[in-house]
Amino acid sequence: MEIKIGTQQILNVLFIFSSLIFVGLCIDACGFIFNTIYSYFRPIGAQYYWNHLDFSDLYAFDKIRFVTTTSLTAIVLVLKAILFYLIVKLFYDKKVDLKYPFQLPMQRFIVLSAYLAFGIGIFSSWATDNYYWLASQKINLPSIYELKIEGSGIWFFMSIFLFVIAQIFKRGIEIQNENDLTI
């Protein structure tokens, strides 16, 4: 007995995983944004922050640094959510035609994903630098992994990779259009 898994089944599974990741990132981003605003006006919220994080030392050190740190983390999470929204939207709108993969909507999706990955890399790098500066000031903070801001180099690498793929798709679209005109 041989089990064959087709491309369509794999795409359906990827759509489900992407949707779940998108929802999780939206919840995380909203949690950070809400708790930042709430904690700004009610200092007790910094001790009982989203996902059981404790920012009370940072809040006591400087309110502006608290807002900066949590806002940078929220920006990274929002950009990740937008990236997964684009993936879910691509699957939902059914703009992927496997017979003609080199299409303008696909190339636009890849370019936009590359820009988002670059933005995630920039804000993640900024947040990480801010985190290490605060740690050098002997402020007790949640770990960098709990804040989900690590890996800026990976996001930069991914953006460059996606820009290269976008150029390949651009050339593929040009060749496909030339072939359509000659027929």
Image (cartoon, rainbow, N blue to C red):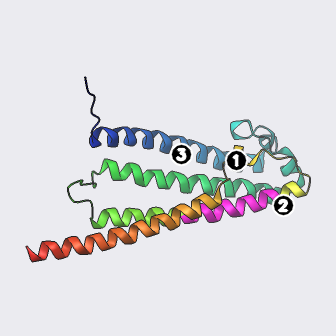
Quadrant of res 177: bottom left
List the single residue furthest toward the top.
1
Question: Residue 133 shows which numbered tag?
Answer: 2
Q: Nearer the viewer, residue 159 or 175?
A: 175
User: Image point 44% across, 44% down: which residue?
Assistant: 18
Q: Amino acid at mark 2?
A: Trp
* Residue 114 rendering spot, x and y as whole percentages: 48, 65
Tell whether position 78 is magenta. no
Magenta: main secondary structure: helix
Task: Establish if 88 lies above or below 120.
Answer: above
Q: Nearer the viewer, residue 170 or 136?
A: 170
- Residue that carries the numbered disc 1 in the rendered image: 147
Tell whether position 122 is magenta. yes
Is disc 1 surrounded by few (<14), some (14 to 19) or many (20+) residues within 10 Å?
many
List the single residue furthest toward the front.
1
Q: Earlier in the sequence, mark 2 or mark 3?
A: 3
Question: Residue 26 shows which numbered tag?
Answer: 3
